[in-house]
Image (cartoon, rainbow, N blue to C red):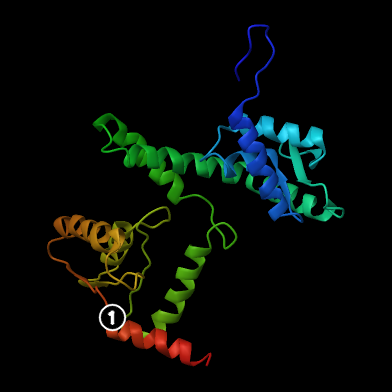
Amino acid sequence: MAASDGGARVPDPQQARARAALTAFVEQHPAQVFFSRQLEVLHEDTYFHWVTNRAVRELVEEGVLHHERRPLRTGGTIHLLWHRSYRFYRRSASRVVALVEAYAQPAITEALGLHGELMALEWSGGAPADAHPRIAELDAKIRQWPRHPGNDPYKEGLERLAEALRPLLPCGLFAIGYNEFCAPSVPEALEQLIRKGARRILVIPSMATPGGVHSERDIPNALEQVQREHPGIRLEYVWPFDLKQVAELLAAHIRRLL
């Protein structure tokens, strides 16, 4: 924000643009309640957070936005905002507060922090050697994090698929392994089967189509690691799938709805 020689604040053109953009945005969503940080993030590709924040304050002063501050059970307050035409906002406001409180629980925020640190270390173009112990520590913590259908629907869905698949197979031993984030890892699941006496292990991923980094790189690398440690064990990677069979499965599913 610039100032004139006399010290008066000169209007910031970016703030004026942000105010116009916010006005258009809330007019497109007249029956929705937002919170201040949400609006800052939604517009951060175009405006700095502080620019959006000042624009919000101006819209509140002008009466375009109505607002309310509510305490959060997790600590602090939340600044709620909605278009002036939204008369019956209280139920929507309560839903927003409940959602923010749910995702502000330590069980979620700590997990996100661990995951973010792991991503930064692993995906920054090659972590230095002295970071490898920390990467292993983070990976172990994330894999052992308490999970349930509410916070990890993918894991629950994969386990349901495994339950349906297992009775269809002519084998006594069966295990689920996860490429990332969950336990057991693919090598750990293979080790469990080997300890139970398996001499030939078929590994099948849940990815139906080729081209993914997990199915084409990560899982084969994990299998190579276990194969080197157990040269007498026969590991077979049953992938890629026959795309014609995949197409037939999808077509059958569609036909049931026609």
232 in relation to 253, above or below? above
* The N terminus lies in quadrant: top right
Compared across the picture, whether 190 is left or right of 200 comes to: right
x, y percentage for residue 195?
28, 63
Give the quadrant of residue 169.
Answer: bottom left
Q: Residue at x 63, y 43 (%)?
A: 21
Farthest-out residue, front = 5
Q: Nearer the viewer, residue 235 or 17?
A: 17
Give the quadrant of residue 115.
Answer: top left
Q: Which of 239 and 55 is in front in this view?
A: 55
Q: Can residue 235 be seen by looking at this rendering? A: yes
Give the quadrant of residue 222.
Answer: bottom left
Residue at numbered disc 1? 243
x, y percentage for residue 218?
27, 57
x, y percentage for residue 208?
34, 73
x, y percentage for residue 210?
27, 69
Compared across the picture, whether 1 is left or right of 34 comes to: left
190 in relation to 32, above or below? below
Compared across the picture, whether 2 is left or right of 27 comes to: left
Q: How many labels does the image show?
A: 1
Q: What residue type is labelled 1?
A: Leu
Q: Which residue is drawn at 43% across and 55% down?
A: 182
Q: Nearer the viewer, residue 220 or 5?
A: 5
Compared across the picture, whether 194 is left or right of 85 comes to: left
Q: How crowded is mark 1: few (under 14 residues within 10 Å), some or many (20 or more)?
A: few
Q: Residue at x 32, y 57 (%)?
A: 188
Farthest-out residue, right = 87
Q: Can residue 76 be seen by looking at this rendering? A: no
**Secondary element at image label 1:** helix
Q: Which residue is drawn at 53% across and 90% down?
A: 257
